[in-house]
Image (cartoon, rainbow, N blue to C red):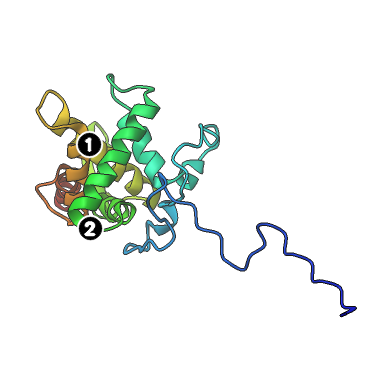
Amino acid sequence: MSSEAPEPESPAGTDDEESAPALLFGQWEVTDIEYYDPSTERYITVTPIAHTMGRHAGKQFKKSEISIVERLINRLMQTDENTGKKQQATRITREAFEIVNDRAEENPVQILVQAVENSAPREETVRLKYGGISVPKAVDVAPQRRVDQALKFLAEGVYQDSFKTTTDVEEALANQLIGAANDDVSTYAVNQKEEKERVAAAAR
């Protein structure tokens, strides 16, 4: 009879297997996202959390630490019809991501990041007053403002395509994201970026 004591069993949850990464909406990975614009990379945060309950609301410049997906959701709420409807805006975004995945066969989070990068204007105009004359002047856009403007253009494009039309809002959002990710000038967000840069080029 062996006198060796039996080895203790490993406690539950201590297997060598790596824990599964958290997924956005339980479906989409957020770990291997590629960035093509180094200037906006630090301002496009991707996390699996789509609702932080406003914990950054009172802190200046902390909005860039919020997930870009949640920032898009918040932008979709900024109309008279959708103010405060966070659950509805989240559902719309989730269903639009599923449409994007079916069409583009790519992670919709990656598509969103590319759409923001392609919709972010690099130049815009400000008005300077010389005496009583107002003169437009071209200026570079700060990276954080570039991301803000891109999200604004995307949300405006969704509203324009879906309000009082036969197009579902989920379909409109998917169209905007795919079009902007492909740098399609016929997409509202990219068109607005090009227009801002064209006006700025004329004001140099």
Q: Determine whether the residue tagged by mark 2 lies in a helix, strand or loop.
A: loop
Amino acid marked by disc 1: Glu
Q: Quadrant of residue 169?
A: top left
Q: Quadrant of residue 97?
A: top left
| Residue 107 in picture, x, y percent from top left | 31, 56
* Amino acid of disc 2: Glu
Q: Is residue 201 visible?
A: yes
Q: How many marks?
A: 2
Mark with earlier residue (2, 1): 2
**SS type, badge 1:** helix
Of circles 2 and 1, which is in front? 2
Asked if 85 appears above or below 91 in the picture, the reply is above
Residue hosting label 2: 105
Q: Label 1, on which residue? A: 170
Question: Does residue 200 appear in the picture of this structure?
Answer: no
The image position of residue 50, as x and y in percent, is: 44, 40
Alpha carbons under labels 2 and 1: distance apart: 17 Å
Left or right of 44? Residue 159 is left
**Above-or-below relation of 161 to 13:** above
How crowded pointer 2 is (Cα within 10 Å; few <14, some 14-19, many 20+) is rated as few
Q: With 183 as the anchor, is 120 left or right in this view? A: right
Nearer to us in this view, 96 or 131:
96
In percent of width and height, residue 160 lies at: 15, 31
Q: Residue at x 32, y 54 (%)?
A: 113
Q: Residue at x 34, y 47 (%)?
A: 147
126 to 163, vertically: above or below: below
Residue 173: % across, % down? 22, 40
Residue that sits furthest to the top in the current view:
80
Residue drawn at point x = 12 percent, y = 23 percent: 164
